[in-house]
């Protein structure tokens, strides 16, 4: 293993104990040169889910064959769907389901160890994955603990509380290692509680800081709420792992919907920092900038979709960019140094806006908010996009997203002055599912592959072999020509691909791994 791989994301891939002192060189590797690992949720800090590997390409992809499969078995009932992105470090895959972590040989699929957490409750909707730093694996439990596991033995080192499950918080987010911080987000069940993100010491688990997804009373942004009580109970969960720019030292993530959900009559205003893209200093937990894709969210759309970091030239100027295809049907391109919007444009059917404001945020149409007799709205409650990871290929300049054109009818059923929880609902209607490729600079659709059914969704992987891998809406892993959208290869699995595929190279062989249902499938080019 070369020095560059050893330094990736400050991961000391050795048997030496991890120390908190990380040098700048260890936090600024040239990620594009790494081929033998997938060490964090999105592969690298950028969120692009792009690999420089090219042995599997548009010519050779038809020679892919199944190398092995691994089906999870747990000591407790339920929660077996693998919603995690597997990590691959030093030839070993690490992945999770609620309450459980596995280490599996990345060449053969042989189980090396299994960790079982004695959960005391919480929501088992899914677990997005683990983080690795040196000889430790970290993951969140549904009963709100951050657990550190010895990477060699699978035994617990320590655990610390990150939330209170009695308040309907639960852990499902993949942690992210940023220097000497284990960054964790928390999920919630939409019962009038505030969202937050926090950082922990990787050696001891000690809390370093916590940042709530609402302003402090008295700050200018607090005026986007009717009062402090509504603000301090206003939601904004941090459902999805963020991205990071080492040069700017900024950690980017999106926040969830405001509460009460659907019925926003008791919380007039934009409701910051819910449904917002935020940039924090990871060393201090201080907010540096924010941009709100979805002001006054009344449709449960949130803005937690992955903020993808792109370096490109806009209007003749080289810019550090951030792109998001948001659940509300809009594509945003921001300057990631300051959060200023450079582009705001729809990428899917939407009818809920009156245009955009001076900051580039969509202006909600009051007529498209939930009503006692219903309001027909696009996108539907599931959204034009959702948590499933997008991808950006620097080879094609295209941003890829699993996109839905769909409608819901939104109803209000709780007309109290202080509604709680959902306070409304939706009834789904017509929908159409596509894999969509956008020009990242303009948001224009360059190609669109419509699936034959609405079905499920899957995350995306792109590679330097001009390939795009994703799951279809039934149970196939599919490879596309990333430039044209032509289907080149597929393999039938037992279930829908439940996160995004990954790829890595070991012993000269390139593997593609995808999780579907309760099974990992590894394909290799022989």
Image (cartoon, grey):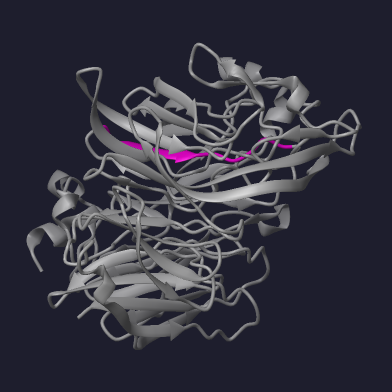
- The residue under the point 55% across, 42% down is 196
On whether residue 253 falls in the magenta region, the answer is: yes
Q: In the rendered view, does 365 fall on the left or right side of 507?
A: right
Q: Which residues are magenta?
A: 248-259
Quadrant of image for the N terminus: bottom left
Is residue 249 or residue 264 the one in the foreground? Answer: 264
Q: Point out residue 318 in the picture as x, y percentages from the top left corner.
A: 20, 24
Is residue 215 or residue 404 the one in the foreground? Answer: 404
- The residue under the point 70% across, 54% down is 168
When asked about the image quadrant of residue 340, the answer is top left
- Count the numbered circles shown: 0
349 w.r.t. 166: above or below: above
Residue 130 in sight: yes
On whether residue 153 falls in the magenta region, the answer is: no
429 w.r.t. 173: above or below: above
Q: Point out residue 327 in the picture as x, y percentages from the top left corner.
A: 56, 40
Is residue 130 or residue 459 the one in the foreground? Answer: 459
Quadrant of image for the C terminus: bottom left
Residue 283 in sight: no
274 w.r.t. 74: above or below: above
When asked about the image quadrant of residue 502, the answer is bottom left
Q: Point out residue 275 in the picture as x, y percentages from the top left corner.
A: 58, 34
- The residue under the point 36% across, 33% down is 322
- The residue under the point 57% across, 76% down is 80
Q: In the rendered view, does 489 fall on the left or right side of 412?
A: left
Is residue 122 or residue 294 the one in the foreground? Answer: 294
**Outermost top residue:** 358
**Outermost left residue:** 2
């Amino acid at each position: 293993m070369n020095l560059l791989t050893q330094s990736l994301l400050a991961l000391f891939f050795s048997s030496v104990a991890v120390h908190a002192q990380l040098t700048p060189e260890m936090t600024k590797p040239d990620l594009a040169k790494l081929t033998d690992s997938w060490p964090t949720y999105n592969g690298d800090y950028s969120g692009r889910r792009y690999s420089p590997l090219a042995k599997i390409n548009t010519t050779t992809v038809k020679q892919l064959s199944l190398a092995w499969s691994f089906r999870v078995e747990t000591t407790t009932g339920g929660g077996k769907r693998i919603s995690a992105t597997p990590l691959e470090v030093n030839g070993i895959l690490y992945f999770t389901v609620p309450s459980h972590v596995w280490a599996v040989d990345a060449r053969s699929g042989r189980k090396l160890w299994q960790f079982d957490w004695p959960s005391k409750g919480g929501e088992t909707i899914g677990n997005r994955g683990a983080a690795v730093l040196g000889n430790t694996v970290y993951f969140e439990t549904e009963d709100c603990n951050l657990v550190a596991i010895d990477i060699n033995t699978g035994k617990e080192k320590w655990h610390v509380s990150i939330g209170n499950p009695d308040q309907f918080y639960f852990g499902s987010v993949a942690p992210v290692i940023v220097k000497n911080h284990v960054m964790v987000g928390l999920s919630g069940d939409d019962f009038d509680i505030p969202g937050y993100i926090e950082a922990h010491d990787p050696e001891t688990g000690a809390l370093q800081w916590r940042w709530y997804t609402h302003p402090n009373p008295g700050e200018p942004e607090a005026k986007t709420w009717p009062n402090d009580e509504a603000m301090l109970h206003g939601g904004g969960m941090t459902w999805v792992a963020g991205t990071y720019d080492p040069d700017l030292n900024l950690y980017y993530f999106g926040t969830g919907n405001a509460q009460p959900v659907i019925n926003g009559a008791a919380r007039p205003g934009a409701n910051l920092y819910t449904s917002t893209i935020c940039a924090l200093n990871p060393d201090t937990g201080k907010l540096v900038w924010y941009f709100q894709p979805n002001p006054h969210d009344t449709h449960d759309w949130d803005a937690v979709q992955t903020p993808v970091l792109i370096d490109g030239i806009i209007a003749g100027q080289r810019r550090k960019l951030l792109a998001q295809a948001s659940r509300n049907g809009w594509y945003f391109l921001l300057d990631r140094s300051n959060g200023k919007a450079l582009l705001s444009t729809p990428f899917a059917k939407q009818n809920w806006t009156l245009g955009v404001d001076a900051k580039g945020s969509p202006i909600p149409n009051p007529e498209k908010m939930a009503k006692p007799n219903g309001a027909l709205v696009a996108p539907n409650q599931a959204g034009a996009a959702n948590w499933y990871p997008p991808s950006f290929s620097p080879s094609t300049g295209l941003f890829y997203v699993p996109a839905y054109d769909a409608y819901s009818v939104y109803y209000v059923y709780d007309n109290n002055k202080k509604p709680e929880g959902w306070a409304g609902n939706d009834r789904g209607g017509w929908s159409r599912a596509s894999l969509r490729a956008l020009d990242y600079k303009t948001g224009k659709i360059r190609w669109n592959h419509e699936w034959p059914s609405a079905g499920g969704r899957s995350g995306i992987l792109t590679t330097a072999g001009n390939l795009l891998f994703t799951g279809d809406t039934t149970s196939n892993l599919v490879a596309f020509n990333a430039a044209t959208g032509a289907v080149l290869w597929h393999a039938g699995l037992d279930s829908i691909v439940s996160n995004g595929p990954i790829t890595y190279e070991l012993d000269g062989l390139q593997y593609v791994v995808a999780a579907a249902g309760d099974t990992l499938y590894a394909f290799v080019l022989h």
